[in-house]
Amino acid sequence: MQKILVGTDASGSADLAVEAAARLAAAQDAELLVLYVRPPLDAREVFDPSHMPDADAYMAAIRERYTEVKVRGRVESGDPAETICDVAEEESVDVIVVGNRGTHGKRRWFLGSVPNAIVQHAPTSVYIVDTRSAQ
Amino acid sequence: MNATMAKERMSSTRRAAIAGIRSFYSQPLGWLALIITSVMLAYGGGGAMFWFHAIYRGEAGPPINDWYHWFFDSTLGFVALTPALFFILPAALWALDQMRLAGRKVKAVTYVLVVGVLFGVATGPGPLFHDTLVGRTAPLGKAAVRIFGRDPEVAARMAGAHPHSTLTEGFLQVVVGVPVYIVAGLLALVTIRTLARRTAA
C-alpha cells in the first residue's frame, strides 16, 4: 500500500476518519492524501462566513498533527462522493478512507449518503470508519 | 462543437446545477435564507413598490384600504416569487463563485447586488399579472373589495387616476425595483447573519 486517500469536510466525524487513515498510513508507511471537499454551493459562505471551514488552516493543522506520516493536502470543490472517486482515480490511490456518518438526517435526504455513493463508484478499495461516536 | 458534445455539456451543466441547489438547501441555513429573503423582498421591497405604483404614480387597483392592499399584493408576491427566489439564491452564490472575489464584505455586497438585480428582473411582469389577476375588474380584485371592504378615500383617489401602459409599469417595476430590492436584500442578509450568529451562540 503506497497511497491512502481520506475524504473530509473538516467536521468532527470526518476527523475520526482522518485519524484512522493516518494510523493506517503509519502502519503501511504509505503517503496520506487528505482531500477536503467543499460543497458546490455552501450557504454559509454568504450568510454565516465565520462558520465556513478554513481549508488552508485545516490542512496545516492536519500536517502538524500527523508528523510521523507523509501527509499531502488537496482542496477540491464539488459533489463529495464524485470528487473523492475522481481524485482517487487521478492519484491512483490504493485505498479510500471515509467516515460512515458524514452525512445524516435532512442533509442525507438532500445529498444522499456519501459513503454509500463512494462504495458504489470507487475505482479502488474502500475503508469505512465508524465515526458515529463523533455525532 | 458537435451535437453529442453539446448534449453532454448540457447534461453536465444540468447535473451541476441540481447538485448546487441540493447543496445550498442541504443546510437549514439555506432554507432560513430563502424564507427571510422572500419575506423581506415581498413585504419590505413590495411595500416600497406598492407606494411607488399605487400612491406615487396613482396606478389603478381595487379600491381598498392602502394597508390591506399592500398586505394583499405582498402576500400574492410572496407566494408567486418564493419559487423564483428558490433558484435565485443559489444562482447568485454560483455567480459569486465564478467571480472569485476575495473579502467577506465584497462577497456579501456582490451577492446582494446579484440577488437584487435577478429578483428585480423577475418581478418585471408583476404589473401585468397584477392588472390581470387582481386589477379593479379582475375576479381577485373584486374578491379583495368584498373581503377588505371599499375604502371611499382610496376610491376617490383612483377615480382621478390616469390609465398607465402595462409596458411602462413593467419597465418602471424593473428600473425602480432593482435598487429597492437591493436594499431589502441587504436588510435580509443582515437579519439572516444575526439569526445565524444567535443560533450558533
Image (spheres, coloured by chain):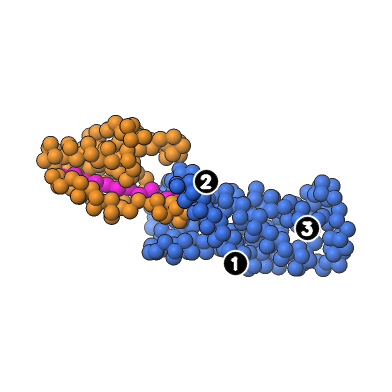
Residue indicated by mark 1: B179
Counting residues from the start of the chain, the first of labels 3 and 2 encountered is 2
Quarter of the rendering occupied by the N terminus of chain B: bottom left
The hue of chain B in the figure is blue
Q: Position of residue A132 (x, y in %)?
A: 33, 31
Q: Nearer the viewer, mark 1 or mark 3?
A: 3
The magenta stretch spans residue A36 = yes
Q: Amino acid at mark 3?
A: Asp
The answer to whether residue B71 is left or right of residue B147 is left
Identify the residue at image location x=38%, y=48%: A39
Q: Position of residue A101 (x, y in %)?
A: 35, 34
In three-dimensional space, the C-alpha distance between marks 1 and 2, rounded to whole angstroms, equals: 24 Å
> Do dots 1 and 3 share one subunit?
yes
Up-down: is A8 above or below A48?
above
The answer to whether residue B77 is left or right of residue A124 is right
Q: Amino acid at mark 1?
A: Pro
Residue indicated by mark 3: B66
In three-dimensional space, the C-alpha distance between marks 1 and 3, rounded to whole angstroms, equals: 23 Å
Q: Which of the pair A61/B80 is nearer the observer?
A: A61
Chain of the residue where label 3 is placed in the rendered structure? B
Count neighbours of disc 2 (C-alpha within 10 A) and say few if under 14, some if 14 to 19, many if 20 or more: some
Query: Which residues are the magenta region?
Result: A31-43
